[in-house]
Amino acid sequence: MTRWEQIKRGLRTFLSTGEEWHSFVTGLCEILCPWPPRCTVCVMPYPNEYHYYAFGRALGVIIWILLAKLIQAWFW
């Protein structure tokens, strides 16, 4: 299997189950409200999907930065 086929297969399986989506959306929504994280690896509903939770939190931080820049450009 070539490297390109491995990448395509990996992209096809990205966020392909409900548990992955749940972890991702939980992380994304938790960062949008500015409180400490509720989940740790041991108490997450799907501990094997922690990397999706962390990716959701990282994407939430990026969204906050973009919103701050948009508000800054709009009002100042």
Image: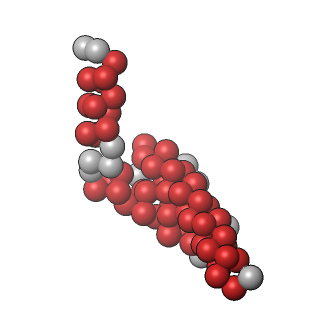
Residue displayed at 42% across by 57% down: 23
- Across and down, in percent, residue 12 comes to 26, 39
Residue 45 visible within the image:
no
- Across and down, in percent, residue 36 comes to 67, 67
View extreme (right): residue = 76
Classify the position of the C terminus by image quarter. Answer: bottom right
View extreme (top): residue = 1
Asked if 40 appears above or below 60 in the picture, the reply is above
Residue displayed at 28% across by 40% down: 13
Residue displayed at 66% across by 70% down: 69
Q: How is the image coloured?
A: secondary structure
Residue 40 visible within the image:
yes
Q: 50 or 11: which is nearer to us? A: 11
Q: 47 or 34: which is nearer to us? A: 34
Q: Which of the 4 image quarters holds residue 21?
A: bottom left
- Across and down, in percent, residue 62 comes to 59, 60
Q: Is residue 1 left or right of residue 55?
A: left
Q: Is residue 29 left or right of residue 17?
A: right
Q: 7 or 53: which is nearer to us? A: 7
